Structures are given as C-alpha cells and as structure tokens.
Image: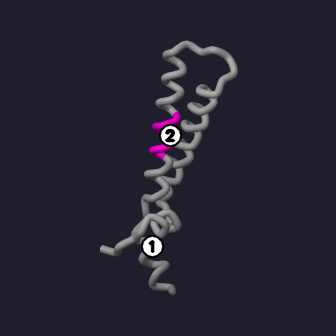
C-alpha cells in the first residue's frame, strides 16, 4: 500500500464515476448556496434545506476529489 499525502491524492487520477459524482456535488453546493444567498425572505424550511444542500454538496465533492484510481496511478508511476 502506498502512502499518499492529501496533495498527491488530490492531483492523482480520479475514477470516472467519482468525476461525475464530484460534478453533482458541485451543482448541489451551488444550488444550496444560491438558496441561502437569495435576496428575498424564504421560509425557514427552504432556507434550512439550502444549508444542508450546500454542506452535502461540499462533502460529496471533497470526498470524490480525493478518491484515487489505483490502477491508473500505478501505470503512470511505471512510465516515469
């Protein structure tokens, strides 16, 4: 098992599924942030939902970004 710090993990190749999941997380965080920053007064339930969406989207994006495709990572290391 190779030891990777967080910077190497973030720069390493990401599997295709997690790239899609990262994009979904970013969209979710953006929509949640838009709801929170809305210039009109929103019902409490909707404002709370926006906060949860922003947090969930951020977590999904962060976890997806640091997921590494080990097979591709190993083949790239062998080429070097």
Name the foreground residue: 80 vs 9: 9
The residue drawn where x is 69% and y is 21% is 39
Q: Label for residue 73? A: 1
Name the element at disc 2. Answer: helix
Q: Nearer the viewer, residue 39 or 22?
A: 39
* Front in this rendered view, residue 41 or 79: 41
Secondary structure state at the residue bearing disc 1 = helix
Q: Is residue 42 above or below residue 49?
A: above
Query: Range of the magenta residues?
Result: 54-60
Q: How many marks?
A: 2
Answer with the quarter of the image where residue 1 lies: bottom left
Q: Is residue 30 above or below residue 45?
A: below
Asked if residue 17 shows in the view, the reply is: no
The x and y percentages for residue 20 are: 53, 49
Q: With 13 as the anchor, is 36 left or right in this view?
A: right
Q: Is residue 9 visible?
A: yes
* Mark in the foreground, 1 or 2: 2
Q: Identify the residue under disc 2.
A: 57
Q: In terms of image quadrants, where is residue 73?
A: bottom left
Are there few (<14), some (14-19), or many (20+) residues within 10 Å of tag 2?
Answer: many
Numbered circle sitting on residue 30: none
Residue 18 among magenta residues: no
């Amino acid at each position: 098992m190779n030891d990777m710090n967080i910077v190497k993990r973030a720069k390493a190749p990401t599997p295709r599924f997690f790239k899609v999941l990262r994009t979904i997380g970013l969209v979710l965080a953006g929509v949640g942030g838009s709801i929170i920053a809305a210039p009109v007064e929103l019902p409490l339930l909707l404002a709370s939902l926006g906060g949860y969406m922003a947090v969930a989207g951020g977590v999904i994006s962060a976890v997806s970004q640091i997921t590494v495709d080990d097979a591709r990572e190993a083949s790239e290391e062998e080429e070097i």
